[in-house]
Amino acid sequence: MRAGVFLFGGVEMDDAGAGPPAPTDRRYDSKEVWRTTERILDVGVLCDQLGFD
């Protein structure tokens, strides 16, 4: 059996949930977006090392 991994990226949101701010009002700088990208790449490398497709 083969198992795969699908990685979906997103910036961590400490203020997520009901109420303000609205999702469309959130803005993230390039540093935060790059940090998220690095985390996705790290997870992808780990999944590959563990044998996932």
Image (tube, rainbow, N blue to C red):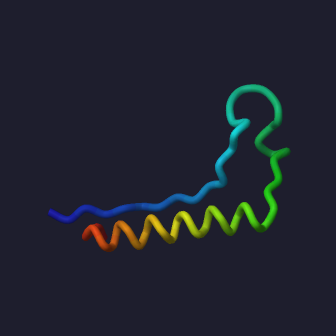
Quadrant of residue 22 within the rendered picture: top right
Q: Is residue 15 left or right of residue 8?
A: right
Q: Residue at x 85, y 45 (%)?
A: 25
Which residue appears at 31% of the width and 63% of the height? 4
Q: Residue at x 30, y 73 (%)?
A: 49
Q: Quadrant of residue 3?
A: bottom left
* Quarter of the image that includes the N terminus: bottom left
Residue in the foreground of this view, choosing between 22 and 15: 15
Residue 22 against residue 53 in the figure, above or below: above
Q: How many marks?
A: 0
Question: Percent x, y for residue 44?
Answer: 43, 69
Q: Quadrant of the C terminus?
A: bottom left
Q: Position of residue 28 (x, y in %)?
A: 79, 57
Task: State the image quarter where residue 21 is shown.
Answer: top right
Relative vertical location of residue 12 with respect to residue 43 in this rendering, above or below? above
Residue 29 in the image, given as x and y percentages of width and height: 81, 62
Residue situated furthest left in the rendering: 1
Most extreme residue toward the top is: 19
Say above or below: 37 vs 8. below
User: Left or right of 7: which side holds 12?
Assistant: right
x and y percentages locating residue 37 in the rendered image: 61, 68
Q: Is residue 21 left or right of residue 48?
A: right
